[in-house]
Image (cartoon, rainbow, N blue to C red):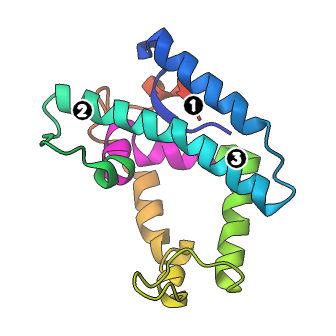
Amino acid sequence: MSYCIVPDMALADGLRNFCDGWRAKAREYSVEEIRGAFDRFFTSYVVFNRLYAEATYRLARRGQVKLRERFPDSHAAQEYLLQYCGAVFLIHAWEADEGSRTALHRIAEHLRERRFALKLDPVTGARRPEADANLLPRRHLTRIVRARNEPRKNHRSGNLSDCQQATCL
């Protein structure tokens, strides 16, 4: 599975070693049972977290985002990562990888059939199926299609070739 986060040539050896070590650990978990799938997900998330933090710091050094006293974790994971690498490339990477594509379709199927819930009431913990339905692809299809057809903005080169040789999750 490969998700472009930062251009390959720009990664320091220490960061590359950190990511490779956690990726290897994640691959050791079997996803045949739910426990292993969650273990693999959370182990992989360590790499994702480190790489979106790196992308955020790089944007900050360029003056494209302003960091305050507290790290903007949610914005970094959801917005700054897209700003740095570009939605078009990320979508292409997900679609190009059969495992990623299959996993995303399975998640959507579980949400549609209400076998699994991502969105829970913050007080009671009750499922919120209407909130889960908002995560399904059809709601975001127009935005995704538009992103595919627009040139990438805010990435330092403005084209996909910078991220084609990338260190990936």
For image coordinates 53% across by 80% down, the residue present is 132
Q: Which residues are magenta?
A: 78-94
User: Can you tell which mark lies on residue 168?
Assistant: 1
Q: Is residue 90 magenta?
A: yes
- Separation of residues labelled 1 and 3 (CA atoms): 16 Å
The disc, 2 or 3, on the residue closer to the chain's N-terminal end is 3
Q: Specify the quadrant of the image occupied by residue 12.
A: top left
- Separation of residues labelled 2 and 3 (CA atoms): 29 Å
For image coordinates 41% across by 55% down, the residue present is 147
Quadrant containing the C terminus is top right
Residue at disc 1, secondary structure: strand
Circle 1 or circle 3, nearest the eye:
3
Q: Looking at this rendering, what residue extends furthest in the right direction? A: 32
Circle 2 or circle 3, nearest the eye:
3
Residue labelled with disc 2: 59
In the image, residue 55 above or below residue 102? above
The answer to whether the residue labelled 1 contacts the one labelled 3, judged by CB atoms less than 8 Å apart, is no
> How far across and down, in percent of the image, does residue 58 sit?
27, 27
Residue labelled with disc 3: 40
Badge 3 amino acid: Arg
For image coordinates 74% across by 55% down, the residue present is 37
Q: Is residue 39 left or right of residue 133?
A: right
